[in-house]
Amino acid sequence: MIEYKNVKKVYGEGETAVTAVNDVSFKIVQGEVVVFLGPSGCGKTTLLRMTNKLESVTSGAISVGGRNIREIDPVRLRRSMGYVIQQIGLFPNKTIFDNIAMVPRVLKWDREKINDRVQTLMELVKLDPEIYSSRYPVELSGGQQQRIGVARALAADPDILLMDEPFGAIDPINRDQIQDEFMRLQARLKKTIAFVSHDIHEAIKMADKIAIFRGGQLVQYDTPEVILTQPKNKFVSDFVGADRALKVLNLIRARDAMNKNPKNILRADTPCPEAMKFFSEKSRTSAIVIKDDKPMGYVTPRLVKFEEGPVSDVVEPYQVFVEDDEPLRDVLSSMLMDSMTTYCVVDENGTFKGSITYQNIQKKILELYEDDTD
Amino acid sequence: MEILDFIRENFDQALFLTWEHIWIVFLSLFIAMITGIPTGIAITRNEALAKKVLNTANILMTVPSIAMFGIMLPFLAPMGWGLGKVPAVIALVLYSELPIIRNTYIAIKNVDPALVDAGRGLGLTRWNLLKEVEIPLAIPVILAGLRTAAVMNIGIGAIAAYIGAGGLGVFIQQGIARSYEAMIITGALGVSLLAILVDSLMALLERALTSQGLKIQGRQ
């Protein structure tokens, strides 16, 4: 856990003094990713660098695991935290192996333990140790280099990671991928992470909580959902962008918006005439056909009209299924490109979970924005 | 061939003078190295001091060598070191300081600040960082400074014969005094060959001590 209490940083003295961080207080809970977000010069990087004493604290206190960092030797403090920077900063004179082994070596681990650790970490960041451990940083792409940067920061298995725009210099396609990989890694490792970013998309994607800074002050500290749906002031709402409703779609999964008990369901063995009766009585235009808890497809009045057998004979299969953990943004995107207005939501085994329509999505968004309409 | 005859007749002396030359040059280079490299590293932490040190070294190097020997004479004479190897070595050390200090200073200064930041952030001590990162990255440039100093010292070492320091300059100096061409040329050739040889050896050393990673970087 990291706690900031009335933290202040002033550069210079007297008339020329510049306040970079001004009276900032908040807590980062164990195992959470907190993104420090804001425009350049807002103090987010300074605050991060104060956390591992690369910058001194002018006043206030930062404590890590309950201890004021003032009492901890800077070298020991830093070795207990991983540090990843935008420029990556792999040592060009050292092989990938030696880069990762750097901190374990200065901590005097024995050789066997270092070998095992490097091997494990390289597998963790998906770079084959056989191929890459004896290479030099310059032989790797930017994305690969930053994977090693992350591995190096994790080498001594610190509880805390400090990351200063770690993926900022990587091209957009690789950035997306490395962010996904990093999130998967974090889901396993559960590190406490302070992550500096100026990219709202990245923040929404990575953060358990977002801390928005402006001119050295903490403006809002909340979950991405709350930041997007209830921005505290104009600065925050401008910063998150006019399309914040679309951004929030990234955060909501299909299972959260779907209709869990849709009424237009037919069993696969329902005879067609009975289905026809269902359509006219309930004035429905389509129905989902379910067999053994799995959606087969759909039928419409036109398909069953002159048939006698079960609906499974005439069922039209779905081209696309929505997985229950798919973000609404992707679901909506499919809907926009497709004539389908109702999608089946399934779990990873293909079991039917519910259905989802435009109306379901809109309803969910409106719910989130309820407090925000005044 | 008059020169070959001269060398054959004076082979032992030629060998001795070459040895003496090498000895003077390398002793002074060694002293300059163990003082110059730490100085160069130390001044990277203090800009004001760096300016003073580099300026002083610069001024020392602009003093012509003959004048340098002359200036040192009154200071060293009371201790009985006015002439001979001692003032020669001192002068060569002073001349070597500039290329060594300057190259070390520039090389350490030029290490990418991001590497230093990453290293510090990971919890490396100043010494760890210097030993593992800064010096290995600076090695090629530091060695280039040593190479410049070595070659220069071989040349200046020849002039030191005038203050009785010995070395291959003796052939040149005595040859001129006697208008003995073969003798002059033997001395001159010896000094030149020595300089070329040392330059090549230092180049090899530079290559051997440069990290593989930096060489790959250099090729790209």
Image: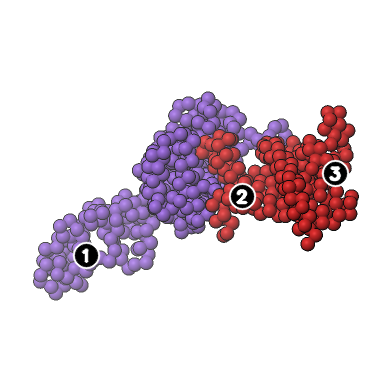
Chain colours: A purple, B red
Q: Nearer the viewer, mark 3 or mark 2?
A: 3
On the same chain, marks 3 and 2? The answer is: yes
Look at label 2 and name its amino acid: Leu
Task: Indicate the chain on which mark 3 is placed.
Answer: B
On the same chain, marks 3 and 1? The answer is: no
The alpha-carbon separation of the residues under discs 3 and 1 comes to: 105 Å
Expressed as whole percent of the image width and height from the top left, the position of residue A129 reads 40, 50
Give the residue displayed 31% in from the left and 49% down from the top: A256
Residue with the mark numbered 3: B162
Give the residue displayed 19% in from the left and 68% down from the top: A315
Look at label 1 and name its amino acid: Gly
At label 1, counting other C-alpha atoms closer than 10 Å, the crowd grade (few under 14, some 14-19, many 20 or more) is many
For residue A204, above or below residue A63: below
- In-image side of A291 versus A177 (left or right): left
Residue situated in front as seen by the camera: B108 or B36: B36
What numbered label is drawn on residue A297?
A: 1
- In-image side of A91 versus A351 (left or right): right
The alpha-carbon separation of the residues under discs 3 and 2 comes to: 32 Å
Give the residue displayed 52% in from the left and 54% down from the top: A138
Q: Is residue A31 visible?
A: yes
Q: Nearer the viewer, mark 3 or mark 1?
A: 3
Expressed as whole percent of the image width and height from the top left, the position of residue B159 reads 82, 46
Residue with the mark numbered 2: B205
Look at label 3 and name its amino acid: Tyr
